Image: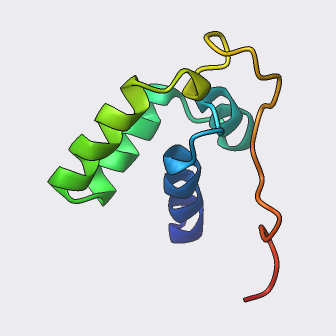
C-alpha cells in the first residue's frame, strides 16, 4: 500500500459519515486493519481521540445506522487544489 492510499484511508476513517464498510469496499481493508493503520500513523493522543470519536458514532458502522450511504464524498473531493 502506498502513502497516498494510507493517507486516503486515514482521511476516510476521520470522516463521520464514511463507515468502515465503505473503507472495506474501496480498499478491501477490515476495521481491525484500519485501526492498526491509524495506530501506526497517528500520534498517540490523536489515535486515542479518534478511537473515542469512533466509538460514539453510529455512522461508522452501516449495521448500526439507518443511512444507506456506503461512503460520504465532499463536493470538493478529487478537485485540483
Q: If the image is split into quadrants, where does the C terminus sit?
A: bottom right
Q: Quadrant of residue 1?
A: bottom right
In the visual, does 25 lie left or right of 41? right
- What kind of colouring is applied to the model shown? rainbow
The residue at 77%/67% (across/down) is 77
**Residue 32 in picture, x, y percent from top left:** 42, 27
**Residue 37 in picture, x, y percent from top left:** 38, 47
Above or below, 33 relative to 49? above
Please state which of residues 29 and 81 is positioned toward the viewer in this rendering.
81
* Residue that protrudes farthest toward the left in the picture: 44
In the visual, does 52 lie left or right of 55? left
The residue at 80%/72% (across/down) is 78
**Residue 68 in picture, x, y percent from top left:** 83, 23
Q: Quadrant of residue 79?
A: bottom right
* Residue that protrudes farthest toward the top in the picture: 63
In the visual, does 78 lie left or right of 37? right
Amino acid at each position: 500500500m502506498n502513502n497516498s492510499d494510507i493517507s486516503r484511508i486515514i482521511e476516510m476513517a476521520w470522516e463521520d459519515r464514511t463507515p468502515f464498510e465503505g473503507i472495506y469496499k474501496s480498499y478491501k481493508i477490515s476495521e481491525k486493519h484500519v485501526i492498526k493503520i491509524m495506530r501506526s500513523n497517528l500520534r498517540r493522543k490523536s489515535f486515542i481521540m479518534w478511537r473515542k470519536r469512533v466509538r460514539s458514532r453510529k455512522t461508522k458502522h452501516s449495521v448500526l445506522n439507518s443511512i444507506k450511504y456506503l461512503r460520504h464524498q465532499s463536493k470538493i473531493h478529487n478537485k485540483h487544489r
